[in-house]
Image (spheres, rainbow, N blue to C red):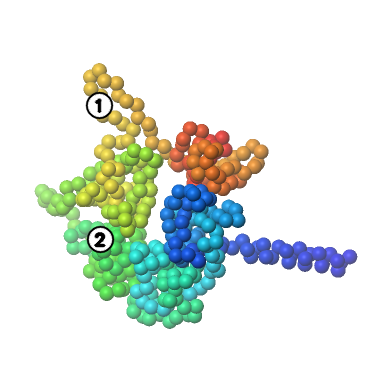
């Protein structure tokens, strides 16, 4: 009896072990075609949301049927893709073989450079396509040319410099821009005030890669190993130097004709500059500058600064109205929807459908178990627009606690 029991236990373990190992995350990438279409629904007749070139990485993958899968690409876009054009990839460790290797937002040199890698830097390869690899490391996550990676350890070149503590300095006392790459053509990710303590990680010509309250690249002339003296106070009767931009310091509020949030970008353009954060309508912001239809802003709801189109700024708090004329009845205004966190509920403990729109006529994206945490962003009739770990969609209000 003891021998039979032992054999039975070993058989059970042999069945369980493969299941455990398969639970690790699997990444996919576009393969077998030069470009694949991302569609609104699982049909070749459905609207095309975007196209993705070979080697573009899928970070979440859910099989829909024998032909289609519902996916999220590395840029955050979600939709349906034909499964035959996606290839699974195993993860591995690799080392950068060349200094000043670009980490990009997509698998081509035309995509934005998000950071810089150096010889000997260790990365985790999430997908390895025909020409580009999608990697993750201390410099962030992005795409690197496959030819610049080695599976064997590569010694550090020594050209990147040794990390050391330093301070931000500026003779005129103004904040200093921290950029995404070594050059003024790179977008500004934030600003640091003189006296801020930072760590210099790498030096590249007249620029240094830093970490601190805002991480990125800064010109060497604004960096000192010596802590600067505190900025002296103005003598009585002294007039401070006025700012160059007359809009600087003015308070504005975010507004929009539709939706519940406004995109704040890393630069003054919708092309080439990623969304840094989406802030709710009504958020109070302070102008830094305004030019060519865009304003540079800061807010206590975000780190550093960002850019927003002037059409999404108003001097009046959204939801308020101007003083009506005598005898005129003010028009009621709709209060902006305030997002909140919640969980999925269902009295019969069954899964609940998440759909592409606020109606049962819309396709089902996925199903969530009762107790799943969600964030509610908007409403339409008896439906809530929600986001959750792995996607977003619409769910009936009856199933939201």
Q: Which mark is residue 323?
A: 1
> Hey, which quadrant is residue 221 in on the image?
bottom left
Q: Residue furthest right?
A: 1
Q: Residue at x 39, y 63 (%)?
A: 105
Classify 329 as above or below 218: above
Whether residue 341 is visible, yes or no, is: no
- Image point (53%, 36%), residue name: 397
390 over 282 or under it: above or below: below
Q: Nearer the viewer, residue 95 or 148?
A: 148
Does residue 228 appear left or right of residue 387 in this picture? left
Residue 78, image x and y in percent? 47, 52
- At 61% across and 46% down in the image, what residue appears? 369
- Identify which residue is drawn at 38% across, 75% down: 118
Q: Position of residue 214 (x, y in %)?
A: 34, 60
Quadrant, the C terminus: top right
The alpha-carbon separation of the residues under discs 1 and 2 comes to 42 Å
Number of the front mark, 1 or 2: 1
Q: Residue furthest front?
A: 45
Horizontal and vertical percent position of residue 135: 46, 68
> In what element is the residue under mark 2?
strand
Q: Secondary structure at mark 1?
A: loop
Task: Determine crowd level at label 2: few under 14, some 14-19, many 20+ residues with C-alpha closer than 10 A.
Answer: some
Instruction: State the residue position of label 2.
Output: 176
Where residue 130 appears, as percent x and y from the top left, is: 47, 71
Q: Is residue 14 left or right of residue 357?
A: right
Choose the circle earlier in sequence order: 1 or 2.
2
Q: Is residue 172 visible?
A: yes
Determine crowd level at label 1: few under 14, some 14-19, many 20+ residues with C-alpha closer than 10 A.
few
Count of numbered badges drawn on the protein:
2
């Amino acid at each position: 009896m003891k021998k039979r029991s032992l054999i039975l236990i070993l058989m059970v373990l042999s069945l369980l072990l493969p299941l455990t190992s398969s639970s690790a995350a699997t990444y996919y990438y576009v393969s077998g075609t030069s470009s694949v279409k991302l569609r609104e629904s699982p049909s070749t007749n459905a609207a095309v949301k975007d196209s993705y070139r070979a080697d573009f990485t899928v970070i979440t993958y859910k099989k829909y049927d024998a032909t289609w899968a519902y996916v999220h690409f590395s840029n955050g876009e979600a939709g349906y893709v034909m499964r035959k054009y996606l290839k699974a990839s195993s993860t591995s460790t690799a080392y950068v073989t060349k200094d000043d290797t670009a980490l990009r937002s997509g698998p081509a040199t035309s995509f934005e450079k998000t950071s810089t890698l150096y010889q000997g830097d260790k990365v985790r390869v999430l997908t390895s396509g025909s020409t580009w690899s999608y990697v993750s490391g201390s410099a962030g996550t992005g795409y690197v040319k496959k030819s610049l990676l080695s599976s064997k350890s590569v010694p550090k070149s020594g050209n990147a410099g040794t990390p050391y503590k330093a301070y931000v300095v500026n003779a005129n006392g103004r904040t200093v821009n921290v950029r995404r790459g070594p050059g003024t053509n790179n977008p500004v990710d934030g600003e640091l005030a003189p006296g801020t303590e930072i760590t210099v990680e790498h030096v590249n010509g007249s620029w240094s890669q830093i970490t601190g309250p805002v991480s990125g690249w800064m010109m060497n002339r604004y960096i000192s190993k010596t802590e600067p003296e505190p900025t002296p106070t103005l003598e009585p009767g002294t007039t401070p130097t006025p700012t160059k931009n007359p809009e600087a310091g003015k308070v504005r509020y975010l507004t929009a004709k539709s939706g519940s949030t406004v995109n704040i970008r890393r630069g003054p353009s919708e092309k080439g500059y990623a969304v840094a954060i989406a802030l709710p309508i009504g958020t109070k912001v302070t102008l830094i500058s305004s030019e060519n239809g865009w304003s540079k802003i800061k807010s206590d709801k975000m780190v550093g600064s960002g850019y927003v189109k002037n059409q999404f700024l108003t001097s009046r708090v959204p939801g308020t109205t101007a003083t009506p004329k005598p005898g005129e009845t003010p028009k009621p205004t709709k209060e902006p929807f305030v997002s909140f966190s919640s969980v999925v509920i269902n009295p019969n403990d069954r899964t609940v459908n998440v759909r592409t729109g606020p109606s049962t006529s819309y396709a089902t994206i996925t199903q969530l178990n009762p107790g799943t945490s969600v964030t509610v962003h908007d409403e339409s009739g008896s439906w809530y627009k929600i986001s959750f770990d792995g996607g977003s969609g619409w769910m009936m209000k009856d199933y939201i606690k």
